[in-house]
Amino acid sequence: MADTGFSKRLETACDGHPRIPAYGQGRQSWLKENIGVSHEAVSRWFSGASRPRPAKMKELARLLEVDEAWLSLGITPALDPADMRVRNTQGEGASNTFMGLAQLNGARVALPDDKDPRAAFVDFYAVFRGQQVPFHVSLATELAAATYNLVLPKEYDQCVTVGAVHSESMQVKYLRLPVPKIDTHKVRRGGYFELILIRQGDRFVTGQDEWPIITDFNDF
């Protein structure tokens, strides 16, 4: 059976790499020359007919500058499949809570349908004063004391991206993540990007930039 998941992630990793030729313009030859395998092997990777052995997968991820766990298995780093299921449930809760707050503030909301080309990265749409706004909500993972990680879709510039920090049982802080600041601080991992946030009292910062806490839906 073809491993289409891996082949799609391989294409995505190549698409985002600054030095790899575009599709149909020598991409497979470039990869063959830089990874040290046969053209047949690379062709089988792209078709999903086979996948690299573990040592070669590690080398491939390093060459493509992506996370090995994502490239190989499609999972977020440091999370096994069981933890990922829990994380997905928590992320859905953060998104649903934010959607409920939008409704409480007078917005009409709707979920993307199966035919929506943005369904993979838009959690919901909210209509404020006649304007439709696509939202993506990313739940932060606490890496260490006062240090958080946010995973963002590669299409973050096509929606309003919101970070959610769940600090206490009944408390979630929602952060506005402006595109220019994401552009400055993002770390590419393959089919997604990461941001590292530091909590300083009631503030969340990356470097010298502060991520504003959302306090009013009129901003949208």
Image (tube, rainbow, N blue to C red):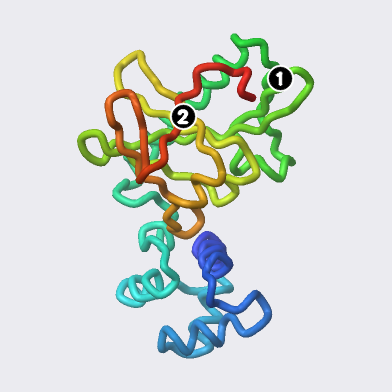
Residue 218 appears in which quarter of the rendering?
Answer: top right
**Which tag is nearer the camera, tag 1 or tag 2?**
2
Most extreme residue toward the left is: 145
Q: Amino acid at mark 2?
A: Pro
Q: Residue at x 56, y 35 (%)?
A: 136
The alpha-carbon separation of the residues under discs 1 and 2 comes to 20 Å
Residue 149 appears in which quarter of the rendering?
Answer: top left
Q: Quadrant of the C terminus?
A: top right
Of residues 86 and 169, the one nearer the viewer is 169
Q: Position of residue 102 (x, y in %)?
A: 60, 17
Q: Is residue 164 above or below residue 121?
A: above
Whether residue 161 is visible here, answered yes or no, is yes
Q: Amino acid at mark 1?
A: Phe
Most extreme residue toward the right is: 130
Q: Is residue 48 left or right of residue 56?
A: right
Q: Position of residue 150 (x, y in %)?
A: 40, 41
Q: Position of residue 33 (x, y in %)?
A: 47, 89
Q: Few, some or many C-alpha atoms within 10 Å of disc 2 (few <14, some 14-19, many ≥20)?
A: some
Q: Is residue 118 above or below residue 130?
A: below
Q: Residue at x 39, y 21 (%)?
A: 172
N-terminal label among 1 and 2? 1
Of residues 32 and 7, the one nearer the viewer is 32
Q: Residue at x 67, y 28 (%)?
A: 125
Give the residue pinned by disc 2.
212
Residue 83 appears in which quarter of the rendering?
Answer: top left
Mark 1, secondary structure of its residue: strand
Give the residue pinned by disc 1.
128
Q: Is residue 209 above or below residue 66?
A: above
Q: Few, some or many C-alpha atoms within 10 Å of disc 1 (few <14, some 14-19, many ≥20)?
A: some
Q: Is residue 220 left or right of residue 98?
A: right
Q: Is residue 112 left or right of residue 18?
A: right
